[in-house]
Image: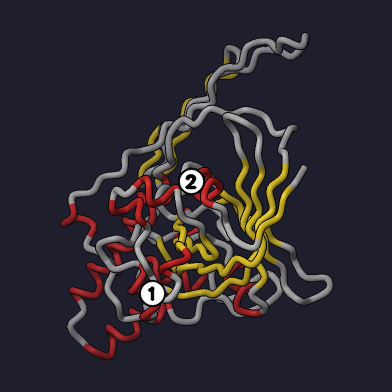
Amino acid sequence: MGKHYDHIPANIVSWIQDQKIFYVATAPLLEDGHVNMSPKGCSDTFHVVFDEDDDSFGAKDPADEGDAEKKVARKSRAVWYEDMSGSGIETISHLKENGRITVMFVAFEGPPQIVRLFGTGKVYEFGTPEYEELLPLNKRQPGSRAVIWVDVYKVGTSCGFSIPFFDYNRPRNKLHRLAAFSEQKDYDNDNMTSNKEEKEKDQGGGAGVPGLRQFWKTYNLKSLDGLPGLEVAYTSSVPFNDWKSTGKVWDADDETIRSKSRSKEGGGATLSLVTGQGLGWDLGKVLVGFGAGLVVSSVRAVASNPAWFEPSN
């Protein structure tokens, strides 16, 4: 049977920190507004704030300090996550309007379990003091646009008996590759622009800057229902990282859809192998095997086209 708590118990904290994906649900106050559910999956974006550190904003997770025993023994009433860039802004818009949010985790391996964190959320955009305290430049990931802070008032656990098993493969690098490229455009532009007036215009998302700020200004200003989205991030003068100088490399994803054998339950034809070699700035040739036919196409991503981002709300 399901259980409810007014905090995140220590055993649930430990389980949450092992998960690879979580989901957030929000909704506007408008009666016929769009209810939103977003999956979140980038590594090291979710953080737990422990009870004894509640008075210290941005207190460190003891896991960062290698104190595993202390981590297991503590409980929590607050969490936060690094919100990555995408073509949607629903979660941020809804939180700015009413603060309601539910965060959900699901077990895809081991014993079945579903955990929901019911809370009140706050948005700290890139360029705000609160964001910088939690995510200084050396910890921020490329594409990060906000911190979502959630004060948890209820935790619910339920069975999840019908959830299938899945084996974790690896994280996707696509967002990091695209975002690092776009942020580098902004960084290079900031350092090349000498005229103060032009620089201020560019930092506000000038049309001539094919960078992340322009993407935010184009896609992240309003929700589907017209609620305000980003208001600070795209105008901020806080510089992005110089990713070229860091030496960090995110390899292209292997987006191969592997062949599936005939279903054990009977029936079901074998599916052909579809190959995609990870969408970077040059897709090159994409080969799709279909019977005896072969389709070859070449697509080149244009750096100034921000629509390459996958939807993320």
Q: Nearer the viewer, residue 253 or 7?
A: 7
Helix, strand or loop at mark 1: loop
Q: Residue at x 72, y 44 (%)?
A: 158
Q: Quadrant of the C terminus?
A: bottom right
Q: Label 2 sits on what residue type?
A: Ser
Q: Residue at x 21, y 87 (%)?
A: 195
Q: Quadrant of the N terminus?
A: top right
Which residue is situated farthest in the bottom direction here? 197
Please tell me in which quadrant of the rendered image residue 259 appears: top right
- Crowd rating for badge 1 (residues with CA inside 10 Å; few <14, some 14–19, many 20+): few
Helix, strand or loop at mark 2: helix
Would you name the residue on which mark 1 appears?
56
Q: Residue at x 79, y 76 (%)?
A: 30
Q: Position of residue 184 (x, y in %)?
A: 27, 62
Please tell me in which quadrant of the rendered image residue 204 appears: bottom left
Left or right placement of residue 284 versus residue 196 in this view: right
